[in-house]
Image (tube, grey):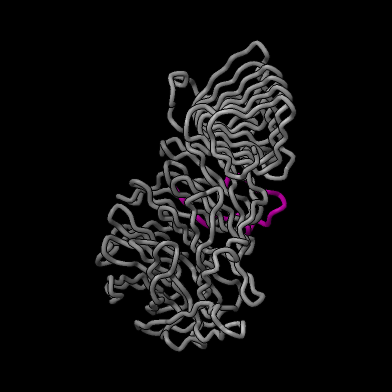
Amino acid sequence: MKKYYILGLVFVLAFYSCNDTSDPNNEEPILESSIIVNSDSESLTARIKRDNSGVVALIDPTVPAGRLLEVASNIPLVMVSQVDAPKFEGKTLQATHVDIDGKYAYVSYNTAGDTYLGAVDIFDITNIYSPKITEQAIFKDTDISSIEYKNGKLYLAAAVNIDQNTQVTSPANLITVSVSGGKFSSDFVYTSLPSYVATDVANTNSKTAVTSGNDGVIGLFDASKTPGATTKMGDLRAVAFGNNKLAVLSGTSGVHILDPNSLSEVITIPLKADVAGSKRTLDIDKDNLYVSEGANGAGIYKMTDGSLVQKLAIPINPDDVAASEIVTNAVSVDNNLLFMANGGAGISISDVSDIAAIKTLGVLDLDGSSNFVRNEEEFVFVATGSGGLQILKIIKSEGPSDAACVGLPNYTGTAYLNINGNESVAYSGSSVLKAVNIGGSFLFCGSLAIEQNLNINSDALLSVNGTFIFGQYKKNTSLNLGSFSTLQIRGNTVIYGDLKLSSGATLEFIGEGNSITVYGSVTVNSGAQIIGKFTDTEGKLK
């Protein structure tokens, strides 16, 4: 166990140093600070891999063997990147939290065991299919538990090794730093508070709320880091702000809903005692509080009176995973989708648009134990401990852009679609299919994702109006255009597998503003043609 001490409150500064490339002897710089900032975006971005990228399958939780869904899903999810965990002096860090604002994502890290070692990565996600790490801070004597962005500033909940860092008076600390354009733009400011470790941080309308674990506190700080109201609570794990209230989660006494200014208790929601020291999170959406409750899954409660709305059990129980690893570590809800990080049982997704009739949509088929998840807008970030990050994109349905799309029904059939030579079918909305075979004509308006194979047979037609995602990277998935067949595209297309055009086949881009990205190989046989206006991001169609 890491050694901590409980002391008072203090406000101090920690200066950081950057890599100095101007040394005339080309020697490594002498690092005298406890914080090292790395601005070499190219070397940092080398940690981002395309392994396992492409259309992601969902597991059917109602089938005991956990088979993949046999019906079409209406949530197109694409794995866009896997990010190796950062390493420092031979030690591998693990992701602890993610916050997203606009075109940047901010990721915090700590290190398991007795070592104090943390980090913050800043990701530029302007092009989500090709994210970059713009800058990184390594904290040589500090674990970072959680991170939040607000108004140009990062707020970090941290644990500092006070045997090494004499500038702080307690292990639990709130660290703040300004950021701009994907870079750290100020010194790092430390504010100490009682207890072993600061576990979480959230901003209210005018204050910053920080929780510290074990015999810790929930404390408020103003913009100048002056301490305000504090309340002692045991084993605090998480804090969230919403509906003009603060919610905090204790591993021993449950959820406490507090006044965000005085910290007086408004509502108490008793819960069973949780495993000591485990990561847990809260999220607030509309009038509901979502709570990760370990082995008990997730609970949903009314913020107005604390009443239980529903308990969501972990939907699958893999035989090859220890029971202690099947726990809900984190919850994240946005745009009516609830993601639960269930450790060795993966990431489950539920539709909470009708809170009285919640639908479990499936379980993400991802590698590694899921310790944290953040779902915001079109992004899903999953932390898998020392396995690093997995970044996914939700492909949103786009509205019809021409008359042929108006009034088309959504597709509700199986995940394997076959269209015979004499058939002409058309659908809209969002669909994820495993394999498609087209003998006639197929029009799709919206967001279409196909995981494995797509055959457009001789003289057949596929027309996609919107967003089209195909295949998986380096997994022998193939999009085949037969002789004299046609694939018409209006919008954005990403192909993770291979593209093959037989003799006489046509790939046609309709209208303006089209783009295509092909990560696999491209084969264009004699007599095939590619016509229309488009941007070829990978240069594969030249």
The majority secondary structure of the magenta stretch comes to: loop
The residue at the point 54 percent across, 80 percent down is 22
Say which of 338 and 461 sits in front: 461
Q: Can residue 193 be seen in the rendering of this structure?
A: no
The image shows residue 330, relative to residue 434, as above or below, that is below
Say which of 509 and 459 sits in front: 509
Residue 37 position, x and y percent, is 50, 74
The image shows residue 87, relative to residue 473, as above or below, that is below
Describe residue 239's horizontal placement relative to residue 447 as left or right.
left
Whether residue 329 is in magenta: the answer is yes
Residue 410 position, x and y percent, is 50, 24
Start and end of the magenta stretch?
A: 314-333
Say which of 153 and 210 sits in front: 153
Quadrant of the snapshot with the C terminus: top right
Tell which residue pokes out farthest to the top in this image.
Answer: 422
Describe residue 192's horizontal placement relative to residue 274 as left or right.
left
The residue at the point 42 percent across, 72 percent down is 212
Residue 438 position, x and y percent, is 66, 21
The image shows residue 350, relative to residue 291, as above or below, that is above
Residue 65 position, x and y percent, is 70, 40
